Amino acid sequence: MKNTSAPDTGVLQQLLRDCENLSLCVKLGDVLQWKNGHLQQLGARLLLIADGRIAAMLPEADIPEDLPQVVHAIRPNAAMADFLSCTAAPGILEGHAHLFLSPHGDVTSVVDELHDRARVNAVMALRHGTFWLRDCGDPHGINLSIRNQSRTSTEPMPFIRACGAAIHRRKRYGKQLGIAVDTDQDLLSAARERIANGADDVKLVLSGIVNFEKAEVPGEAQFPVSAVRDVVTLAHDNGRRVIAHASGEAGCLVAADAGVDTIEHAYFVSPQTLDIMAAKRLTWLPTLAPVHAQWRDAERYGHSPAIRDSLRRILDGHAQRIAYAAEIGVCIAGGSDSGSPGVGHGSGAVDEFALLAEAGLGRMRAYAACSAPGAASLGFTQSLNACEGGAAADFLILSTSPLDDPSCLNTPRAIVRHGRLSAYIHEPARCGS
């Protein structure tokens, strides 16, 4: 970052005088920010951070070569971090996580151990750049506790939305994610209970899971459209959203007709149901990562060559539906189903970004799905305008732009969270040192 002429330090000096609680100055080679759904590339900037917010941004032309001395003379207690070779970027979204699960298959039924695991997984997700995380269910409601901890923890964690326990039909799929109900009226009562317990979202299980060998999701939807619509009305009246686990046309059609807020997975969804989703402005989380992990590591999971071929066909068909959905305007958000076998907390969200890009979104649209625009579509409101003057100081410092190399999100050079620099490789120097 070299200026062709010596800048006038008056602007910087005045800003420093105005920033009484200046805590951090960060020099960056480039800054990316989302603005009205579009990614802006601002170029080299100096960020002044005070009271956990970005107090000011200076362009390269206004940054003097003797910056440390200028800052030290006015704000001697401010820290200086030099990341001239790096890019500041908004965090990424994990829209579908199960924090209590281990992607390595480690099994425990002790609730305290599951709670400890969930907390560690949330911290790990942040270290991979995940700033927004939506937990989509566990039978113990651990995610509600972790969400509450995240709001007061001294250890940085993502912003978390939690649904408590998912709701499924008794003797149908979903026991590992929540609790069972017998009747449609029980479904409404269970949804009312979730809301009373403080859930951000109500999670319904409408189908089973993909049969890899037969490449299908058998069975009818677990609940009828009328019952699901009643839950949607109840949730919306109470400022909540409805999440629907659905794969196979039967479950997906019920979810779309009922107007749930997000449909998760939706393997084998028809173009006609995607048309309904587009018309109703529903959000789809395709969760490519768990099926991709089964295909990628088929031998590890004991799949025959025939099943591996079937997995590839499932993924290719899903990619075609994703491309069609993008073409007709379905809102797509990133969620990796982290905690599923082979899908890590944090790393799974990065994988989902890359897989969505390859599936027909391209990197720009995939990044939008897996960053602030996607987070906004799921109901998050925090730090959506990261790297903007006056915004909360919550951003990643990466070795390069994620549009050039999504894998850089797995190893941020630093994380600025609530105005504090952490997880950095090089210790920031005090101004004047």
Image: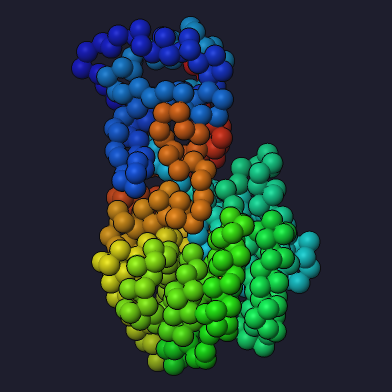
Is residue 299 among what the camera can see?
A: no
Q: Position of residue 124 (x, y in %)?
A: 58, 53
Q: Position of residue 314 (x, y in %)?
A: 38, 82
Q: Nearer the viewer, residue 359 or 384?
A: 384
**The quarter of the displayed image where residue 291 is located:** bottom left
Residue at 51%, 29% in the rendered image: 53
Q: Is residue 171 left or right of residue 364?
A: right
Q: Position of residue 356 (x, y in %)?
A: 35, 64
Q: How is the image coloured?
A: rainbow
Q: Is residue 215 left or right of residue 21?
A: left
**The quarter of the displayed image where residue 2 is located:** top left
Q: Is residue 163 left or right of residue 244?
A: right
* 248 relative to 413, above or below: below
Quadrant of the drawing holding the N terminus: top left
- Residue at the left extreme, as displayed: 4
* 412 relative to 124, above or below: above
Q: Position of residue 390 (x, y in %)?
A: 45, 28
Residue at 63%, 86% in the rendered image: 172
Residue at 50%, 60% in the rendered image: 95
* 213 relative to 327, above or below: below
* Tally of numbered tags: 0
Residue at 55%, 79% in the rendered image: 226
Is residue 335 among what the camera can see?
A: yes
